[in-house]
């Protein structure tokens, strides 16, 4: 297997999903408003981060991506909480001492509730960019001695599509039928690109050797049927949810690496009635529309086995997507997320083996992939529910948040230890 020496192996988490106690987040307000299962103490990682480091050591990991919670560090506009920053710095330091490279994400969906109290249109206006940059500046000053790899945004298109397109996530704004105007054409995507560019500039001026990227969720897109219209629909959907942002940043040299979050394949059909002329076969869309309408509009779901989230498992897609991104942008890739919601854990071993073999195939074809970070280290809060279980470690929330290796942890540890040789 072509995993070079120094290949990064590890896991990813996100602050809001594991830390607990983030009551100042817009997500906490959203859960109350929509009567969702509350995140509460999550996996209690804010208190138990040393346990998480221990789990990573057990996995022989040499990298860990976590995020810094904006609402914790900046509980009120312009007010920063140094103790929180010190704890993040201590975490990063202890990771480094354990031989685990900290990779820090600055925006993973959750934002301070005050941002939207002040600016209800959120990122439809300019103001959040300035607030975000002030936050980034403080975090980088506090952590630059410990961290030199940064992810500005996690899955900006997922966040924007759910929060500003479908309105399923905070701030709950709906622009489904004006996606093109709202997202493209000097819209939300360009604003996020600007925030990334400025954040990268800030980071590099504080820390010239830093590497700054972003993590993009890229699905393996397939036309629903062998028809030119479906291919065209696929291309316009691809441009919206993947390509536009990467074209803007990749071609301008604004990405030192590209984080790839890969989960599944999506079939795209042409549909004149829908935005962008495209009917993407997401399960979430099928659930929102109801099956009959979804199928009437040409929607197609994959026929393969599905995870507990209803996502089709398509391991070969990881390699295909990695190779495609490498050929398109020639920017080093880091798999920043890939994992399976599997409460039994019985499918996790095959999932790991098959996806990693596929990644190795892409590397054999020339894709420059620097690492693989599994989603996720521990069972966590899955944006509205604790039911999906992505963790290599289960968390018993009724028993002092005890971590226990889940099925798949042992195999992953042996893959990591052997640098992929056992695959
Ligand atoms: C997100 C994570 C999420 C995971 C599984 C990714 O889209 O970055 O926050 O938990 O998928 O749904």
Image (cartoon, rainbow, N blue to C red):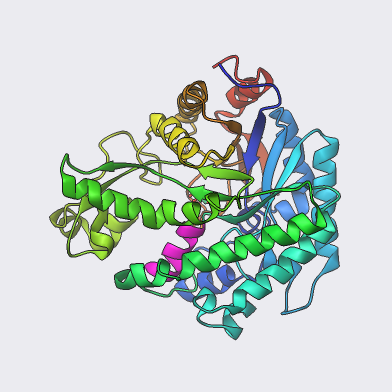
Is residue 199 placed above or below 148 in the rendered structure?
below
Say whether residue 274 is left or right of residue 9: left
Residue 20 can be seen, yes or no: no
- The answer to if 163 sits in the magenta stretch is yes
Residue located 61% across and 68% down the image: 111
**In the image, which residues are magenta?**
156-168
Q: Position of residue 260 (x, y in %)?
A: 52, 43
For the N terminus, which image quadrant? Answer: top right
Q: Quadrant of residue 16?
A: bottom right
Q: Position of residue 162 (x, y in %)?
A: 43, 64
Say whether residue 262 is left or right of residue 29: left
Q: Quadrant of residue 421?
A: top right
Residue located 49% across and 74% down the image: 171
> What predominant SS class does the magenta segment belong to?
helix
For the C terminus, which image quadrant? Answer: top right
Residue located 46% across and 58% down the image: 157
């Amino acid at each position: 297997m072509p995993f070079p020496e120094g290949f990064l192996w590890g896991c990813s988490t996100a602050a809001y999903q594991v830390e607990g106690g983030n009551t100042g987040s817009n997500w906490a307000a959203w859960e109350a408003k929509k009567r969702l299962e509350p995140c509460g103490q999550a996996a209690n990682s804010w208190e138990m981060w040393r346990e998480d480091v221990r789990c990573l050591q057990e996995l022989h990991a040499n990298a860990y991506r976590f995020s810094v919670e904006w609402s914790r560090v900046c509980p009120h506009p312009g007010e920063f909480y140094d103790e929180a920053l010190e704890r993040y710095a201590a975490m990063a330091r202890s990771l480094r001492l354990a031989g685990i490279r900290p990779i820090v994400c600055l925006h993973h969906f959750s934002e301070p509730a005050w941002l939207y109290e002040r600016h209800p249109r959120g990122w439809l206006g300019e103001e959040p960019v300035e607030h975000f940059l002030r936050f980034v500046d403080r975090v980088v000053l506090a952590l630059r001695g410990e961290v030199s790899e940064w992810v500005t945004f996690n899955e900006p298109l997922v966040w924007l599509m759910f929060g500003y397109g479908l309105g399923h996530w905070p701030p709950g704004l709906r622009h489904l039928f004006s996606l093109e105007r709202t997202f493209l054409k000097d819209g939300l995507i360009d604003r996020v690109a600007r925030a990334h560019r400025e954040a990268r500039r800030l980071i590099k001026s504080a820390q010239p050797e830093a590497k700054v990227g972003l993590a993009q969720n890229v699905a393996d897109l397939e036309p629903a049927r062998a028809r030119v219209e479906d291919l065209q629909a696929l291309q316009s959907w691809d441009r919206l949810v993947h390509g536009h942002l990467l074209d803007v940043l990749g071609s301008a040299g604004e990405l030192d690496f590209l984080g790839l979050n890969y989960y599944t394949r999506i079939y795209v059909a042409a549909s004149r009635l829908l935005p962008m002329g495209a009917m993407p076969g997401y399960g979430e869309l099928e659930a929102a529309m109801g099956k009959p309408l979804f199928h009437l509009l040409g929607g197609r779901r994959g026929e393969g086995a599905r995870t507990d989230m209803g996502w089709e498992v398509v391991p070969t897609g990881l390699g295909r997507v990695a190779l495609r991104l490498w050929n398109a942008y020639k920017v080093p890739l880091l798999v920043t997320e890939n994992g399976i919601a599997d409460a039994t854990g019985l499918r996790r071993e095959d999932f790991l083996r098959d996806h990693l073999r596929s990644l190795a195939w892409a590397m054999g074809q020339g894709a420059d992939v620097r690492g693989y970070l599994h989603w996720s280290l521990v069972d966590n809060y899955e944006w509205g529910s604790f039911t999906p279980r992505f963790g290599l470690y289960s968390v018993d929330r009724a028993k002092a948040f005890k971590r226990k290796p889940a099925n798949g942890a042992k195999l992953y540890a042996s893959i990591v230890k052997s640098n992929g040789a056992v695959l």
